Each structure stands twice: as structure tokens, then as C-alpha cells.
Amino acid sequence: GAGVSQSPSNKVTEKGKDVELRCDPISGHTALYWYRQSLGQGLEFLIYFQGNSAPDKSGLPSDRFSAERTGGSVSTLTIQRTQQEDSAVYLCASSSLQGTYEQYFGPGTRLTVT
Amino acid sequence: GENVEQHPSTLSVQEGDSAVIKCTYSDSASNYFPWYKQELGKGPQLIIDIRSNVGEKKDQRIAVTLNKTAKHFSLHITETQPEDSAVYFCAASRVNKFYFGSGTKLNVKP
């Protein structure tokens, strides 16, 4: 079946503008994660959604970052008033949390703030 | 919180040799340890995982070992091939939160 998809694949924006990044998880997966990967670095946890529970936002670096998940499926990560240090690859992953805990990652959105 | 350290940051081996990547973790409650392979321009892909009730797991040329007492786990790749060249990440997880190592760039020279 289809994997995790993300859009856009690349986004270039000017400092101070808002951006929205989209994630379509694997159908039926109840858990959805957002990570940030700076150049040559590991994955930094941002936010985690599980079913209808309140999301775990403990990884969001500032109040400029927010995310929502509509209908338990598609998720949008919004960055307001972007800064140059926000430039990174933003990865989304989903998991079924049924029996196994395997995460399946999307290809990521490369964000460049000029 | 959990802290995962991964070594080495880069590893260069000759085709056919073995490669070993090591990770340590700090939270004894972590109970799931996946390894991911990330190729350029792509998202990480799960290649093997191990749970805290198992000491070793093998899948063809790759294997993972876990030492819960010492809080470390390792990835072993035997008979390396050029297509194994990529960045490899370890992670430790509990309660559905994942903490990643900083990655190892593996270069397999033909």
C-alpha cells in the first residue's frame, strides 16, 4: 500500500513568512510523529499525535511552531514568522501501535529560510 | 529524559568487510530499539529492531545485539556492499516516544 507522503518536498521561504507542511500518514495508523533533521544531524522530536488523545508537544522548540491533525489522519505543521535557524528537513512518521511499534517515515520536506 | 549516543560518526570499510555501529542509552525503561538506514534525499527506513526481552536478532547480513545491563546496543553488518553506503541511525523508545542517535555515515569502498 501507499507509504507516508509529505508535501511540499521542498519549500523556500523568506524570513518572517509563515509556512505549512503537510503529512499524509499510512491509512489506519493512529500514531503520527513530526521530527526535524538539521544538516548532518540526528532526528529531533517535535510533536506526537496518538488517536484522539491530546498531542505530546514537548519537543516544539518555540511557540512559533504548531501542529494539528484533522480527523485522525492528515497532519499540518505550521511555522510562523520563520527564522533562518528553522531551515532543516522536516520528517513525518506514522505507526500503527498495534503489536509492533515500527515507525514508517515519509520522504521529508526540505525547508530553506532565506 | 532519554539520551542516546552513537559512535562512530563516520565509518569507512572495504567491500566485503564487516561494519559495527554502537549506541548507548540512559533510560533503563526504554524497551524498543530500532535501527534506520537513510539514503540521500530520503526518509529513514527501518532495517532491523530489537525489544528489551531479546539479546540478539539477525536478518541475513545484519544483526543487532542488546546489553540491557550496560545499556548499549549495536548494529552489525557483514559482507558489506556498496549499496550499504548510507547514514544509519539508532533509536531508543519507551511509551511510544523515540530518541535518536546522531547518525553514522557508512561508506563502503568497492
Image (spheres, coloured by chain):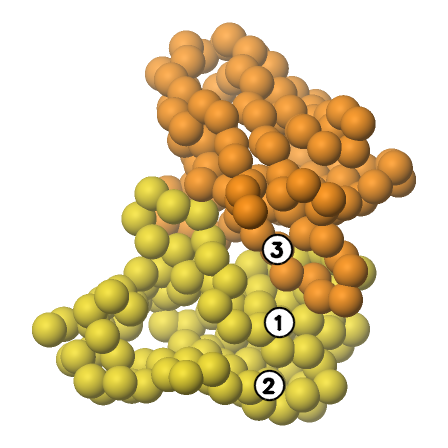
Chain colours: A orange, B yellow
Residue plotted at (44% across, 47% down) = B43
Of mark 2 and mark 1, the one earlier in the sequence is 1
Q: Quadrant of the C terminus of chain A?
A: top left
Q: Residue at x 20, y 85 (%)?
A: B16
- In three-dimensional space, the C-alpha distance between marks 3 and 1, rounded to whole angstroms, equals 12 Å
Q: Amino acid at mark 3?
A: Gln
Label 1: which residue?
B33
- Mark 1 is surrounded, within 10 Å at the Cα level, by few (under 14), some (14 to 19) or many (20 or more) other residues, namely many
Tag 2–tag 3 contact (CB < 8 Å): no
Residue B109 screen position, x and y as percent? 14, 72
Secondary structure of the residue carrying numbered label 2: strand
A22 w.r.t. B10: above or below? above
Amino acid under label 1?
Answer: Phe
Residue at the spot 24% in from the left edge and 66% down from the top edge? B83
Residue toward you, B49 or A1 = A1
Instruction: Return the x and y of residue A81 as percentages of the image width and height.
Output: 56, 12
What kind of element bears circle 3? Answer: loop
Asked if residue A40 can be seen in this view, the reply is yes
Chain ID at mark 3: A
Q: Chain of mark 1?
A: B
Distance from Cα at disc 2 to Cα at disc 3: 20 Å
Query: Do callouts 2 and 1 point to residues on the same chain?
Result: yes
Q: Position of residue B94 (x, y in %)?
A: 75, 65
Give the residue type that dot 2 points to: Leu
Pointers 2 and 1 in contact (CB under 8 A)? Answer: yes
Which residue is the site of mark 3?
A103
Closer to us: mark 3 or mark 1?
Answer: 3
Residue of label 2: B66
